[in-house]
Amino acid sequence: MASPSSDVAKTIVLIGKIGNGKSATGNSVLRRKAFKSMSSSTRVTNTCEMHTTTLLENGQNLVVISVNTCDLMNQMQLPGLFDCSAEPQFIGKEIAKCINLTKDGIHAILLVASIKTRISKEDEEAGVLMLRSFFGPKITDYMIVVFTGGDDLEDDDTLDDYFGRNCPQHYKETLRVCGNRHVLFNNKIKDEPQNFEQGKQLLALVQAVVNKNGGEPYMSPRFVELKGGATSEFFYDAPAVKVNSEEEKFKLKEELHKSYEEQLKRITETVNLKLKESSDKLAQQIAEQVNARLKAEIMTLSAQVKSNDEMYKMRLELLETAHRKENEKQRQQRHQIVSIYML
């Protein structure tokens, strides 16, 4: 397996339900307050954001790819995917922005879940199914589950203790789909060495995902289709164009802005169409799951009713047998009494 080059920027996308701590997690990894973050159940990140950092500590690379080299990391937040209240047009536009920003593909997706603000089984299944339906089934090969709220665990408790005692079954299923890649985060840590250590653990998982996928970022055919090639190349290469005056600079900015808006509009339209297709497919899958679940429940209930009915019949037969025996016993006793008087 080829070793991934250490000077290639690695792109991480954070997704998750509102209030699960995407912003705080991004800030913990970046080791600076880049994303706006607060303790709230309302959306803090209203649009797709990207921040870049150089991961170095004492001249050493945090993610050990090669010693004394820089590892650039792009961090993006994709809001709305697990938020059932978000408008489809909003989600489509944000996914389009995400695709536009991840020009070199995605190296890892962090699914941020909270151990205290639990996402419902239906929302989580819908979110994961939507990701797989839209981006393709291999997207889960790049996913890591980040559990936030480590400060809410009881003293000396570990994540394994939580899994054994309180972890919902659908969380375990999501972990299974993601290859059991997970890490516990405490975004309230003030101690810098501790915060650095948990960030290091997460980045080690990211590197494990990169290695597992041969150093290749996720770039599905749909990514290539949506990015469209020519417009993207113009957009990303245009800053290298030489300008000789403020007027030319202004015109170039206008052209870049217009090009970006046209590209974003085109991608958004395509994304919305794909989202509609994925949503229809997802709705069908959920309906099939619900029908299968209802059918199983009906069969279980029918079996219980049948079992109860059989038990009722058995009890009735026992009572009738006992009643017959008692009647026979009384008849025999009366017969004996009559026989005595007749002697």
Image (tube, helix red, strand yellow):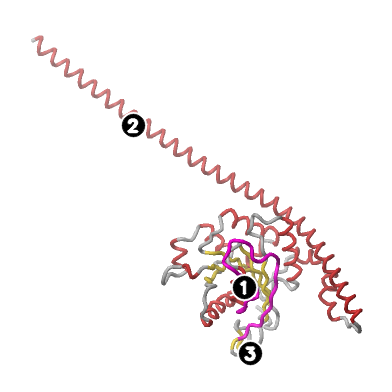
Disc number lying in front (3 or 1): 1
For marks 1 and 2, give the one nearer the viewer. 1
Instruction: Give the total of numbered labels.
Output: 3
| Nearer to the camera, 96 or 149 | 149
Q: CA distance from mark 2 to mark 3?
A: 81 Å
User: Compared to 321, does 128 lie above or below?
Assistant: below
Q: Does residue 278 appear to the left or right of 341 in the view shown?
A: right
Give whichever of discs 3 and 1 has the lower sequence position: 1
The N terminus lies in quadrant:
bottom right
- Which numbered dot is residue 26? 1
Residue 315: numbered disc: 2
Badge 2 density bin: few <14, some 14–19, many ≥20, Cα 10 Å? few
Residue at the extreme left of the image, as rendered: 343
Q: Residue at x 76, y 68 (%)?
A: 100
Please say if 86 is above or below 215. above
Residue 342 on image: x %, y %: 10, 9
Please identify, in this view, whether the residue under mark 2 or under mark 3 is nearer the observer.
3
- Span shown in magenta: 30-56
Q: Amino acid at mark 3?
A: Asn
Q: What kind of residue is marked 1? A: Gly
Examine the structure image and report whether residue 89 is included in the region drawn in magenta: no
Q: Which residue is mark 3?
A: 68
Q: Which mark is residue 39?
A: none
- Tell which circle, 1 or 2, labels the residue nearer the N-terminal end: 1
**Residue 257 on image: x %, y %:** 84, 70
The residue at the point 20 percent across, 17 percent down is 331
Neighbourhood count class around disc 3 (C-alpha, 10 Å): few under 14, some 14–19, many 20 upward: some
Q: Quadrant of residue 260?
A: bottom right
Residue 162 % position (x, y): 46, 65
State which tag comes first along the sequence, 2 or 3.
3
**Residue placed most toward the observer, 222 or 188:** 188
